[in-house]
Each structure stands twice: as structure tokens, then as C-alpha cells.
Image (cartoon, grey):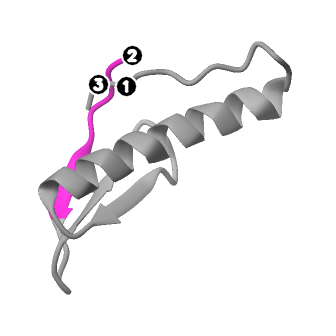
Amino acid sequence: MTLKVLIHKAEEGGYWAEAPALPGCVSQGDTMDEVRTNIREAIEGWLLAEDGAAQAGPADQVLDVTV
């Protein structure tokens, strides 16, 4: 799965990112590498939470998401 992610410079320094296709899925980091890692983790968590809300069980998976 590939999602579009918007990365913004934060006023207080560093960066923040959002995945517009996933409401409320945002993250931040001090460097570009850190924000990329953090938003990838946030996307994985968001997707797992949505799967878990529908039906929790042993078939839950972590997806690799290209950002």
C-alpha cells in the first residue's frame, strides 16, 4: 500500500507530517529521517487500530507502507 504524506516544517523547529487519507494520522520529528520513520509507524498503528476495531484476532498484520 502506498499513501501520500505531507511533510511540513514546524514553526518551533523540526517537522510534522500528516497522511490525509487517514484522518488524525499525524506525527513529528526533529529531522526529516525521524519524521519519515515516525509517520510510517503512525500509519502502521492507524491501520492496525482500524483492523482491530473491525475484528481483533490472530490474523492482524503489520503492513509495510511506502511513504
Q: Read off the magenta span.
A: 1-8
Q: Give, as a three-letter code, the residue at label 2.
A: Met
Q: Compared with residue 4, is residue 58 higher up or lower down, i.e. above or below?
A: above
Q: Position of residue 34 (x, y in %)?
A: 24, 56
In the rendered image, the vertical position of residue 55 relative to residue 31, given as above or below: above
The kind of secondary structure element at disc 3 is: loop
31 with respect to 24 (left or right): left
Label 3 environment density (alpha carbons within 10 Å; few <14, some 14–19, many ≥20) = few
Closer to the chain start, of discs 2 and 1, is 2
Residue occupied by mark 2: 1
Lower position in the chain sequence, tag 2 or tag 3: 2
Residue ID at (15%, 63%): 31
- Front-most of residues 64 and 20: 64
Marks 1/3 in contact by CB < 8 Å: the verdict is yes
What's the amino acid at mark 3? Thr
User: Picture coordinates of residue 10 (x, y %)?
Assistant: 19, 75
Q: Position of residue 25 (x, y in %)?
A: 47, 50
Check whether the beta carbons of the residues at disc 2 and disc 1 lie within 8 A of each other.
yes
Do the residues bearing badges 2 and 3 touch, measured as CB atoms within 8 Å?
A: yes
User: What's the residue at 69%, 38% (across, down)?
Assistant: 49
Query: In this figure, which residue is indicated by the disc labeled 3?
Result: 66
Q: Residue visible at 38% across and 59% down?
A: 27
Q: CA distance from mark 1 to mark 3?
A: 4 Å
Q: Secondary structure at mark 2?
A: loop
Q: From this viewpoint, is residue 65 visible?
A: yes
